[in-house]
Image (tube, rainbow, N blue to C red):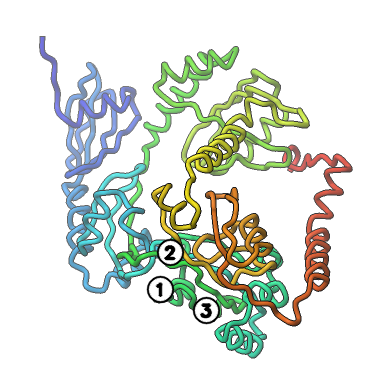
């Protein structure tokens, strides 16, 4: 037995338009709208056809330009010579602030954009997306930087410090003394190793051609920054991407149908977390687990979720929420657990403990495999190589080419010249070293270093004093429950 009907009529049935007064809108190579009626109401401006549901009719109007318009726009975007102008003239256009490498793109995007071709259009997350490479640069994949932040009005000071630093001045000590950004000043201005895509605007322009050891001045916003590059990986091609997206909007009929499905889900999900999981499995949706800490007003990663968070504060374990309108989605939540424990249970921190134990065991294994009486022999025993380091002081927070390694810095600063060190367990590796030269500053004394360390500790104490007092007072942040 075979049943059939006109494409528009079958599509209308599939959309659930089976009652008089309901409408369905469709898009593709052609686009159109169908109005369901209960009698043959002829209109010379519209097409009248029988519905596949007995006793119903469809009044239809349409255009053959739906998908054709998208194809036309695709050709125009691909042929545009002034890509920036074309994208900025489009309300759905966006130009990325940063440059990305092929590894940061999907295989299809990288293949097209790295070759200077257009990517798309493709349907992603209910949006038609097409992209072109606006610009390209050969830049390091990752850059390790330290910085000194100064007010914008202190350009003369910035130029003076830049001159001193380029002549060999200690960057960490200068940052600790002059930088107004406390979060990094206490650590010698250490920002860390970041992918080049993390830098935008003036920072990307200044660091694009920077090499290891370079110090650059960057004026941005209301601040001037002196940046020292202590690591610059091998350059590779990065592109700045210009993208145009067109959202695919759900019709009123589709939203009504999804809301009905959400109502059915609520009926099946009541009672327990297990019932919630079974209902999700039946509806072919994947539940998302979210944690709300005291004081949180929204759920991380969920747009416009204020009402969901407010409901959670007043709910009990096992409660099921009503249907929330969250952005363009419907959300139903169940409260699975309320944790009022002062300390995290073992099962919640087991992954962190496992990571620490594995780090300790790796250290033991590497030390056990280490052999040889010289640095070169020990490196060879592990299939590694000897690398040079320099300019490490007692007040340093990093080692060139290695990064933040406080234990290693301390071990180097206290080592004897020419002596092979014992293995040092660092944050990201095991280190053995030999100090080839020691320079002593006449102005640097043990007592002076003690005073400097004490001053730094006092500064950090002030920074953490208020959070410590709040913790001691056991203050509860209930703002998220009421506001």
Residue nearest the observer in this picture, 467 or 147: 147
In this rendering, position of residue 327 left or right of residue 459: left
Helix, strand or loop at disc 3? strand
Task: Please provide percent x and percent y for residue 433.
Answer: 55, 59
Q: Is residue 330 above or below residue 147?
A: above
Q: Is residue 123 above or below residue 231?
A: above
- Name the residue located 18 percent from the left edge and 44 percent from the top edge: 30
The mark that comes first in sequence, 2 or 3, is 2
- Name the residue located 43 percent from the left edge and 64 percent from the top edge: 196
Whether pointer 1 and pointer 3 mark residues with C-beta atoms closer than 8 Å, the reply is no
Q: What is the C-alpha distance between the residues marked 1 and 3?
A: 13 Å
- Name the residue located 26 percent from the left edge and 55 percent from the top edge: 110
Nearer mark to the viewer, of 2 and 3? 3
Nearer mark to the viewer, of 1 and 3? 3
Q: What is the C-alpha distance between the residues marked 2 and 3?
A: 16 Å
Name the residue beneath numbered marker 3. 215
Q: Is residue 3 above or below residue 175?
A: above
- Residue at the right extreme of this rendering: 473
Residue nearest the observer in this picture, 422 or 184: 422
Name the residue beneath numbered marker 2. 196
Helix, strand or loop at disc 2? helix
Task: Please provide percent x and percent y for residue 134.
Answer: 30, 68
Name the residue beneath numbered marker 1. 208
């Amino acid at each position: 037995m075979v049943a059939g009907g006109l494409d528009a009529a079958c599509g209308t049935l599939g959309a659930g338009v089976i009652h008089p007064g309901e409408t369905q809108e469709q898009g593709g190579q052609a686009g159109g709208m169908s109005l369901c009626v209960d009698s043959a109401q002829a209109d010379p401006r519209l097409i009248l056809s029988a519905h596949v549901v007995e006793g119903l009719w469809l009044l239809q109007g349409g255009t053959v330009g739906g998908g054709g318009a998208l194809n036309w726009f695709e050709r125009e975007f691909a042929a545009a010579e002034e890509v920036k102008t074309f994208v900025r003239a489009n309300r759905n256009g966006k130009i990325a602030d940063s440059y990305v490498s092929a590894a940061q793109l999907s295989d299809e995007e990288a293949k097209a954009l790295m070759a200077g071709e257009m990517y798309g259009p493709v349907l992603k997350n209910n949006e038609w997306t097409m992209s072109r490479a606006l610009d390209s640069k050969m830049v390091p994949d990752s850059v390790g930087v330290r910085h000194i932040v100064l007010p914008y009005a202190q350009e003369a000071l910035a130029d003076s410090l830049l001159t001193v630093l380029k002549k060999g001045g200690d960057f960490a000590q200068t940052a600790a003394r002059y930088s107004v950004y406390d979060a990094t000043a206490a650590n010698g201005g250490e920002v860390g190793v970041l992918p080049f895509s993390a830098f935008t605007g003036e920072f990307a322009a200044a660091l694009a051609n920077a090499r290891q050891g370079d110090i650059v001045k960057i004026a941005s916003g209301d601040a001037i920054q002196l940046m020292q590059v202590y690591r610059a990986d091998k350059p590779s091609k990065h592109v700045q991407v210009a993208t145009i997206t067109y959202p695919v909007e759900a019709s009123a009929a589709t939203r009504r149908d999804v809301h009905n499905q959400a109502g059915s889900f609520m009926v099946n999900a009541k009672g327990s977390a297990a019932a919630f999981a079974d209902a999700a499995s039946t509806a072919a949706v994947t539940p998302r687990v979210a944690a709300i800490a005291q004081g949180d007003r929204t759920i991380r990663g969920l747009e416009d979720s204020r009402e969901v968070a407010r409901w959670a504060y007043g709910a009990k374990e096992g409660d099921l929420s009503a249907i929330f309108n969250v952005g363009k989605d419907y959300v139903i939540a169940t409260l699975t657990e309320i944790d009022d424990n002062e300390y995290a249970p073992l099962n919640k921190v087991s992954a962190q403990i496992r990571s620490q134990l594995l780090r300790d065991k790796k250290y033991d294994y590497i030390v056990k495999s280490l052999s040889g009486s010289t640095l070169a022999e020990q490196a060879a025993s592990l299939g590694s190589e000897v690398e040079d380091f320099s300019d490490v002081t007692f007040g340093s927070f990093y080692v060139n080419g290695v990064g933040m390694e406080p234990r290693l810095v301390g071990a180097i600063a206290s080592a004897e010249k020419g002596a092979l060190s014992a293995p040092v367990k660092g944050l990201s590796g095991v280190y053995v070293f030999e100090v080839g030269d020691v320079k002593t500053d006449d102005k640097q004394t043990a007592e002076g270093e003690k005073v400097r360390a004490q001053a730094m500790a006092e500064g950090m104490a002030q920074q953490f004093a208020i959070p410590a007092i709040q913790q001691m007072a056991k203050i509860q942040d209930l703002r998220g429950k009421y506001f």
